Image (cartoon, helix red, strand yellow):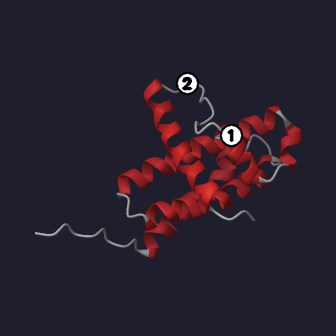
Amino acid sequence: MPPSSPRPPRPQDVAKLFALMDSWPKSWAGSAADIPVGEGLVAELRPFIRHLYERGLSPKTIRRHLDNTWVIGGEIIRIVVEEPKRRKTHPRQLLLDAIDLAEAPLVRGASEQEQRSFDATARRLLRFLNSSPQP
């Protein structure tokens, strides 16, 4: 029996994930000034999540990467809070700076296994961003 090809993603599945992402900027924000930065990060991350769907990854794998991008985004906002001048940096550059070594920022309180998972997402995200046209 020939292997079956992955089922193409249904648009409503992607829409549900995007709807989850809509709440991220407020969940990351320590103050109202963080929300626009968070919105910019979400706008940069949506094509990555769509790409994962188009690659035919399993829903569980996509969800793991989605959850990991939420954590990475939260760490980027933490960096921006600590370095307010970074608020003016384009969100794509904030992402690239955070994962430039193909590793996620160190996440406070994360186990080694969790950090490895964040790093795997960061590597995949970095490959995606480097192969995607810049705005």
| Quarter of the figure with the N terminus | bottom left
x and y, in percent, of residue 21 in the image:
58, 57
x and y, in percent, of residue 67 in the image:
50, 47
| Label 2, residues with CA under 10 Å away: few <14, some 14-19, many ≥20 | few
User: Which residue is under mark 2?
Assistant: 109
Q: Indicate the amino acid at tag 2.
A: Gly
Q: Is residue 78 left or right of residue 21?
A: right
Q: Is residue 113 left or right of residue 47?
A: left
Q: Secondary structure at mark 2?
A: loop
x and y, in percent, of residue 7 in the image:
31, 71
Q: Residue at x 84, y 46 (%)?
A: 87
Q: Is residue 33 left or right of residue 68?
A: right
Q: Nearer the viewer, mark 2 or mark 1?
A: 1
Considering every residue shown, the one lying at the far left of the view is 1
| Label 1, residues with CA under 10 Å away: few <14, some 14-19, many ≥20 | many
Q: Residue at x 52, y 27 (%)?
A: 110
User: Which residue is under mark 1?
Assistant: 98
x and y, in percent, of residue 132 in the image:
63, 62
